[in-house]
Image (cartoon, rainbow, N blue to C red):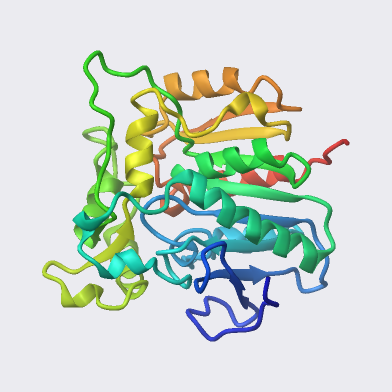
Amino acid sequence: MSVGHPMTLDTMDAREEHHRIESPHPGLSLFLRRLAPPTGGGRPVLYVHGATFPSALSVAHQFANGAWRDALVRAGFDVWALDFLGFGGSDPYPGMSEPAEDRGPLLLAADAAIQLETAMRFVADRTSAERVSLLAHSWGTAVAGLLAGRHPDLVDRLVLFGPISRRDPPRYRPRPDGPAWRIVTAQAQWERFVEDVPAGEPPVLSRTEFDDWAQRYLDSEPGSRKRDPAGVKVPTGPFVEILRSWHGELPYDPGLVRAPVCLIRGEWDGLATDADARWLFDAFTGAAERRDVKIGRGTHLLHLEANREALWRESIAFLDQPTLP
């Protein structure tokens, strides 16, 4: 593995460190951002993003009241965030420059978990920590769960926000599949913010805040504005894997996870419903501790919504607990 080195890519904070490390794919590098407490030290936490946007647009995105990682740093955590291959500051897969139909979906969980392990070992080495906590969103929760089951010695605590769960397969079910990549437009992202909010309820995110976020979203991939409509190219593996989970094929066994686990979701999250959380909570049979937290007036994108500080508080409260051997 190469030694990380500072970069100038997409700096979200003047105190932020950027690192590139060799990925498990020869010739391709992974991007990590870090924001540590001013006094140094702090228990390391690694953020794992979801299916459509990288760390700059999630844990590091700055609102008027700061970013999620700012709250974590104030609580004393050393916050790291990984961009998977095909996202943000990490290299794209070579297949993303080819016709999407020429190959199957890129970035399935089995591949992503190896990338995450590479990042975790780098973080542990740089911070001299025996274990690293994981803070994951959406499809990223499946990657975090897969890694935690394979390498329990690496994981301190596990926060799964908007977790993807197994659902009973349809009676007639062709196995979901897809091309290598797809385009996700800013308009499609806006629709994700509003589609699960019940009729008559105030919006969960102001249009002004979303428009700022959307411009940064388009900035996350060169060439996004040359498309009509403008959109970001992302690997399709995460989408396919979510559909497969809803067809009975969750890509990991929650029963293998030994670390303490906290499930956090918004009350209007259509991708992490009460039934999903109930199944997943019961499936973590080997976890040292289990929590299921539901936050009002939130959807699957609660970390970018008006009630985001409630998510910040709940994640910090769980991560701040000591983990016994």
Q: Find residue 227 and report its horizontal and vertical position in percent.
A: 15, 72
Q: Residue at x 74, y 39 (%)?
A: 152
Quarter of the image where the C terminus is located: top right
Q: Is residue 250 above or below residue 50?
A: above
Choose between 300 and 114: the one closer to the eye: 114
Task: Answer yes or no: is residue 12 visible.
Answer: yes
In this orientation, which residue lies closer to the viewer: 219 or 269? 219
Residue at 44% across / 23% down in the picture? Answer: 276
* Residue furthest right as drawn: 325
The residue positioned 80% from the left and 61% from the top of the image is: 42
- Between 210 and 26, the one lying in front of the other is 26
Is 126 on the left-hand or right-hand side of 279? right
Numbered disc total: 0
Q: Residue drawn 57% across and 77% down?
A: 13
Task: Name the spot of residue 191 as percent of width and height, x first.
Answer: 22, 49
Q: Position of residue 125 (x, y in %)?
A: 79, 64
Instruction: From this view, report whether residue 103 is shown above or below residue 125.
Output: above
Q: Residue furthest bottom?
A: 8
Q: Kindly tell me whether residue 268 is visible in this rendering.
A: no
Split into 4 quadrants, where in the image is the N terminus?
bottom right
Rendered image quadrant of residue 101? bottom left
**Up-down: is 199 above or below 22?**
above
In-image side of 121 versus 6 (left or right): right
Point out residue 166 in the picture as x, y percentages from the top left corner. Answer: 44, 25
Q: Which residue is the extreme one toward the top?
A: 171
